[in-house]
Image: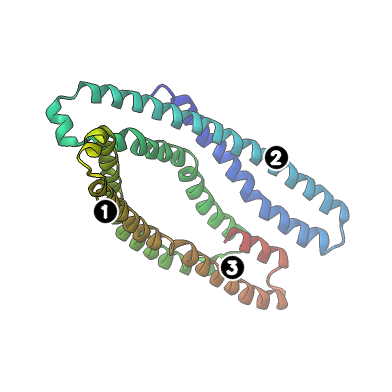
């Protein structure tokens, strides 16, 4: 609540950046179809200058959005960390034994950092991506409805892929979190009882405990990362299939004078 102004300004500046990004392909289409095609150098220079202005406005929006989003996220995380710390100080010994030191350390550090990242992503990417996706689809239909229809079949397989990865990755990342708690607990216990461990020559036992916890964290992290790593190449595959289809059908339409080269360039960019 104390940072609601920054949280409100950030998305507005992101809207400015997205709007400027969506105008660029239309300007490129104008350069190709109305400038280069007709040999109108003045129009090319005029449109190029407009693209520079749009790019600068987009940069102002993007930089401003990042500044305000970071302020809102980091300040919220700071307040949350302070509140969590005070709450831990007020817990009973029974609560502390039940929760575990490692889990509490994770809450104060990694978890609150994740909340900060969530706020930052929400104010930037969560605003940018839907606007850019919906805006690109609308601009693609405005540019060339025929080519825009080629993009629609790509949406269902992409949605199915993302739903599958999210469903499979969620329990894996829960295991990663549990493993991280275990590592923190072992480290804290070792440091708190280091004199006793040395006195009773229990170093090897402690090394084995840490090795077990560390290996579990490693294996769970690798499984989760391997699964989510599928996303990027799969999306790129769908993207390139779409580009190939646009070039195939668009190229034939250009030969029949039903489309222009500029429309194909703009449609590929919106895709």
Q: With 132 as the anchor, is 55 left or right in this view?
A: right
Q: What secondary structure is marked by label 3?
A: helix
Q: What secondary structure is marked by label 1?
A: helix
Say the numbered circle drawn on residue 147: 3
Quadrant of res 58: top right
Q: What secondary structure is marked by label 2?
A: helix
The nearer-to-camera label among 2 and 1 is 1
Q: Would you call the spot at circle 1 few (<14 residues within 10 Å), some (14-19), or many (20 or more)?
A: some
First along the sequence among labels 1 and 3? 3
- From the image, which quarter does the C terminus lie in? bottom right
Callout 2–callout 1 Cβ contact below 8 Å: no
- The x, y position of residue 113, in whole percent, is 39, 37
Taking depth in this image into account, of 183 and 207 the one nearest to the observer is 207
- The x, y position of residue 198, in whole percent, is 25, 38
- The x, y position of residue 73, in whole percent, is 44, 32
Quadrant of res 32: bottom right
- Residue 205 visible in the shown view: yes
Callout 3–callout 2 Cβ contact below 8 Å: no
Say the numbered circle drawn on residue 212: 1
First along the sequence among labels 2 and 1? 2
Label 2 to label 1: alpha-carbon separation: 53 Å
Q: With 194 as the anchor, is 6 left or right in this view?
A: right
Residue drawn at (18%, 36%) of the image: 99
First along the sequence among labels 3 and 2? 2
Q: With 199 as the anchor, is 242 left or right in this view?
A: right
**To which residue does mark 2 refer?**
56
Name, please, the residue furthest toward the left.
94
Above or below for 271 versus 193: below
Label 3 to label 2: alpha-carbon separation: 30 Å
């Amino acid at each position: 609540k104390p940072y609601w102004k920054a949280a409100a300004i950030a998305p507005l500046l992101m809207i400015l950046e997205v709007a400027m990004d969506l105008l660029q392909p239309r300007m490129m289409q104008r350069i190709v179809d109305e400038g280069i095609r007709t040999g109108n150098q003045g129009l090319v220079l005029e449109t190029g200058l407009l693209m520079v202005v749009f790019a600068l406005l987009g940069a102002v929006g993007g930089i401003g959005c990042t500044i305000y989003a970071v302020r809102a996220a980091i300040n919220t995380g700071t307040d949350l960390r302070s509140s969590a710390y005070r709450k831990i100080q007020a817990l009973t010994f029974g609560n502390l034994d039940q929760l575990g030191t490692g889990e509490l350390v994770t809450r104060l550090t990694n978890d609150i950092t994740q909340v900060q990242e969530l706020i930052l992503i929400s104010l930037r990417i969560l605003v940018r991506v839907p606007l850019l996706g919906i805006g690109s689809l609308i601009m693609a239909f405005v540019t060339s409805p025929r080519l825009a229809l080629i993009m629609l079949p790509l949406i269902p397989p992409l949605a199915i892929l993302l739903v599958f990865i999210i469903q499979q990755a969620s329990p894996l990342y829960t295991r990663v979190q549990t493993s991280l708690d275990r590592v923190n607990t072992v480290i804290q216990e070792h440091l708190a009882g280091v004199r006793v461990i040395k006195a009773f020559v229990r170093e090897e036992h402690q090394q084995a405990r840490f090795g077990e916890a560390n290996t579990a964290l490693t294996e769970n992290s690798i499984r989760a990362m391997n699964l989510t790593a599928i996303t990027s190449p799969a999306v790129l595959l769908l993207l390139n299939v779409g580009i190939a289809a646009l070039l195939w059908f668009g190229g034939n339409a250009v030969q029949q004078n039903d489309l222009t080269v500029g429309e194909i360039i703009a449609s590929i960019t919106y895709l």
